Amino acid sequence: DLLRQFYNQYYFAANMRLVVVGAYSLDELQQEVVKCFSGIPSEPREKAPWPLKYNNIGTWQQMLESPMASNPLPMQPSSLQKIYRLPPVRDRHTLTVTWQVPPQIQYWDSRPCDYISHLLGHEAKGSILASLKEKSWATGCFVGTGTEGVEFASS
């Protein structure tokens, strides 16, 4: 029931992108695309609890207005600026640092979090990680935004 409801609310053409590459004529490709995808509705079958709002549908300027943007940040101030020390389960030491940043969907074209991730995670000579490795303070680094980076990202 829940899967069908999700399908009816979010499986529609405005939520999708299609790229077609093939060694056929443009007419042949178009014919196949129409045959395979014309059954997908252009709008949702039923209203979603958090409806997605689009501006400039069908243009290169199409932009999704996230329903999450008006919500507060997920990590409350009371849960920030804390250090948690946990006894290790294995002979392994790990440090996880998380930054809470505001929604990034409006920066989809410049991706500032990707830039920061590259600076922090780059491994070349002279990089932050190379300096940490030189001092034996680190052996590796994983840097990136969470999967929900367009809403509330962490690096």
Image (cartoon, grey):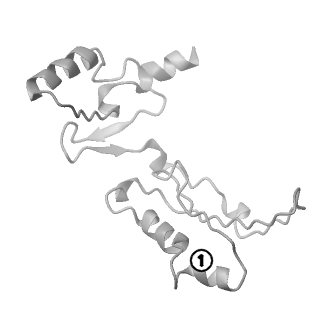
Considering only vertical position in the picture, is 155 above or below 125? above
Circle 1 residue: 129
Q: Which residue lies at the image location 60% right of the left edge and 63% below the top edge?
A: 142
In x, y percent, where is residue 108? Answer: 35, 55
Count numbered badges in the picture.
Answer: 1
| Amino acid type at mark 1 | Leu
Q: Which residue lies at the image location 90% right of the left edge and 62% below the top edge?
A: 87
In x, y percent, where is residue 80? Answer: 69, 65
Residue 29: which quarter of the image? top left
Considering only vertical position in the picture, is 130 above or below 76? below
Q: Secondary structure at mark 1?
A: helix
In x, y percent, where is residue 153? Answer: 53, 57
Left or right placement of residue 144 versus residue 61 in this view: right
Q: Quadrant of the C terminus?
A: bottom right
Q: Residue furthest front?
A: 23
Q: Give 96 or 126, whichever is nearer the viewer.
A: 126
Considering only vertical position in the picture, is 126 above or below 52? below
Residue 40: which quarter of the image? top left
Q: Quadrant of the N terminus?
A: top right
Q: Give 17 or 69, whichever is nearer the viewer.
A: 17
Q: Which residue lies at the image location 71% right of the left edge and 70% below the top edge?
A: 81
Q: Residues within 10 Å of mark 1 (few under 14, many from 20)?
A: many
Q: Give 142 or 77, whichever is nearer the viewer.
A: 142
Left or right placement of residue 146 versus residue 42 in this view: right
In x, y percent, where is residue 14? Answer: 30, 31
Q: Give 89 or 56, whichever is nearer the viewer.
A: 89
Considering only vertical position in the picture, is 36 above or below 26? above
Q: Which residue lies at the image location 53% right of the left edge and 48% below the top edge?
A: 147
